[in-house]
Amino acid sequence: MKSKSIFKRRVMAVVLAGTAGLAGFAAAPALAAGIDAQIPLSGIVTGSQETVSFSGVARINSRLAPDPDFNLPQLILTVDLAGIPGVGSTTTAKYVISGPEIIQRRLAASHTVQFTFPFAPANGDIFSTRSGVASFALDFDQNTGAVIQGSG
């Protein structure tokens, strides 16, 4: 009986030590969390169901990922369109965009970034999900990876 309780205490100590290590690790990436930019975005998605107009502000987080081996730093971009509302042209139904897009590019002074995003009616009808294409022209600070200018 004593061997079981000693075993339980040792396992709990290892689990707690592992958890404490993860908590310390989780705080470390905040130093390299990236830099946020807000880029105005407006556009129209046409389709067979109805045309949907989107207008709002895209949040773009850019982070510089150094490459010490080959000296080819990368930009890690997180583009969040979730706060941009859409409105149907014929039904005036509201549409929402889900989830951020993560994009990796080689460090350069500027990039044109284009990606497909899903959107659906705000009433939660996931079977009516459609897709649109977002495009951004972005300029970057090559020392920090920050977006210094952009349009969408």
Image (cartoon, helix red, strand yellow):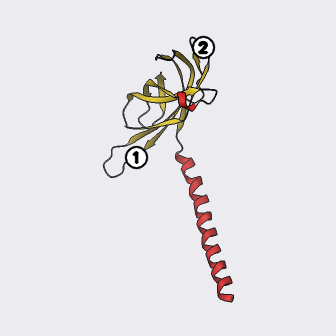
Q: Residue at x 61, y 75 (%)?
A: 11
Picture coordinates of residue 133 (x, y %)?
44, 24
Which residue is most to the bottom?
2
Horizontal arrangement in the rendering, residue 57 relative to residue 66 (left or right):
right
Q: Position of residue 22 (x, y in %)?
A: 58, 60
**Amino acid type assigned to the residue bearing label 2 in the image:** Thr
**Mark 1 belongs to which amino acid?**
Pro
Count of numbered marks: 2
Whichever of labels 2 and 1 marks the residue nearer the N terminus, that label is 1
Report which quarter residue 139 is drawn in. top left
The residue tagged 2 is: 91
Q: Which mark is residue 94?
A: none
Question: Marks 2 and 1, how far apart in space?
Answer: 48 Å
The residue wearing badge 1 is 66
Question: Compared to 145, does 71 lie above or below?
Answer: below
Helix, strand or loop at mark 1: loop
Query: Quick check: 70 left or right of 44?
Result: left
Kindly state the secondary structure of the residue where label 2 is placed.
loop
Residue at far top of view = 90
Q: Quadrant of residue 122?
A: top right
Image position of 66 with respect to 137: above or below: below
Which residue is pictured at 61% across the width and 59% down the height? 23
Residue mark closest to the camera, 2 vs 1: 2
- Asked whether the residues under the numbered discs 2 and 1 touch, taking CB atoms below 8 Å apart as contact, a structural biologist would say no
